[in-house]
Image: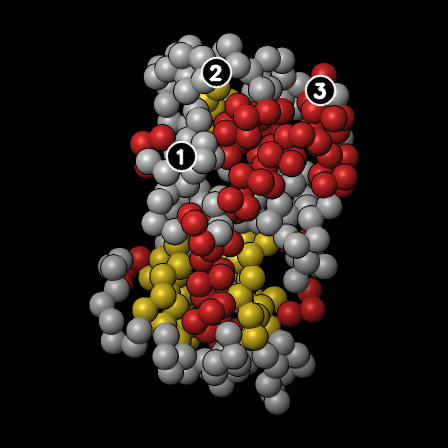
């Protein structure tokens, strides 16, 4: 599943290509989206912005003379979804049968492939009366509230810290990769209950998470794959994720692996470097 850094980069790319331009083409495989387009056409509207909200992406469209106000298209990639950007007439890298949404302008065509979660909503409802309103503080938002994120984690005292970090209602943007990487860098064992961790230790984990995600959306990231170690070599980019049985980069202890929590999500950790 794409994590917050991936969604942020995708939204930034779409925003740069589409914002300020008029929609000349809209297609969708989803009947509810098609009905909205039939009733209040998306073509003819201007794309005002494309934004990331945790693991959600929002494409904002201007209002028109036939409707009461702006529209917003919210999408969530889940496990296999992705947005691509093409020039008109350029061959798609994925088969047409995987297309779910097409938003085109005179200069670019944005295509959502295998995106399973998509809906139109009023622009004024984004983050107020929708799914996004239930999210915790977005780790990549300029106004990220670290204190609130810590409080939301503390409210999940009976959960393991690994599961709590994945709870998007606590803080938004972390997935399996960053969950394991944050806990390694913070020296915290993934099965420790949140209620057993001091506030300053939770605050440190939140700070690490924000720094790691931010480091993976900057210009230095492009073309090098996701990195948390600070090393440029692709094979040395991550501390523990995907390295079960291989030696810890710090102490040499074999990295442990287990499936954890709802959905049996993969967790990687160093038994020596990470303590409860």
Crowding near the residue tagged with mark 2, few <14, some 14–19, many ≥20 C-alpha atoms within 10 Å:
many
Crowding near the residue tagged with mark 3, few <14, some 14–19, many ≥20 C-alpha atoms within 10 Å:
some
Q: Which mark is residue 270?
A: 2
Name the foreground residue: 106 vs 263.
106
Q: Secondary structure at mark 3?
A: loop
Judging by the rendered image, the residue that carries numbered circle 1 is 231
Dots 1 and 3: beta carbons under 8 Å? no
Q: Which mark is residue 118?
A: none
Q: Secondary structure at mark 2?
A: loop
Nearer the N terminus, badge 1 or badge 2? 1
Quadrant in which residue 206 is drawn: top right
Dots 1 and 2: beta carbons under 8 Å? no
Q: Is residue 262 above or below residue 134?
A: above
Quadrant of image for the C terminus: top right
Which residue is pictured at 61% across the width and 66% down the height?
121
Q: Is residue 207 above or below residue 19?
A: above
Residue 216, percent from left and from top:
48, 45
């Amino acid at each position: 599943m794409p994590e917050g850094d991936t969604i942020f980069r995708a939204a930034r790319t779409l925003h740069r290509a589409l914002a300020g331009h008029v929609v000349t083409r809209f297609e969708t495989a989803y009947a509810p989206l098609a009905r909205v387009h039939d009733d209040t056409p998306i073509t003819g509207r201007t794309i005002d912005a494309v934004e990331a909200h945790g693991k959600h992406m929002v494409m904002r469209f201007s209002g028109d003379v036939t409707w009461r106000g702006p529209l917003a298209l919210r999408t969530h990639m889940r496990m296999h979804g992705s947005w691509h950007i093409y020039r008109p007439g350029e061959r798609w890298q994925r088969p047409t049968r995987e297309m779910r949404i097409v938003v085109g302008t005179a200069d670019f065509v944005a295509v959502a492939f295998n995106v399973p979660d998509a809906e139109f909503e009023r622009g004024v409802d984004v983050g107020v009366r929708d799914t996004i309103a239930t999210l915790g503080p977005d780790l990549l938002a300029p106004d990220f509230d670290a204190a609130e994120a810590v409080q939301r984690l503390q409210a999940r005292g009976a959960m393991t810290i690994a599961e709590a970090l994945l709870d998007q209602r606590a803080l938004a943007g972390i997935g399996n990769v960053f969950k394991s990487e944050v806990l390694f860098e913070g020296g915290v064992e993934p099965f420790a209950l949140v209620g057993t961790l001091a506030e300053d230790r939770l605050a440190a984990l939140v700070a690490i998470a924000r720094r790691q995600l931010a480091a993976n959306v900057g210009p230095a990231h492009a073309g090098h794959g996701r990195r948390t170690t600070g090393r440029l070599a692709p094979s040395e980019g991550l501390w523990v994720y995907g390295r079960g049985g291989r030696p810890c980069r710090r102490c040499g202890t074999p990295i442990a692996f287990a499936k954890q929590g709802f959905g049996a999500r993969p967790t990687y950790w160093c038994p020596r470097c990470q303590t409860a």
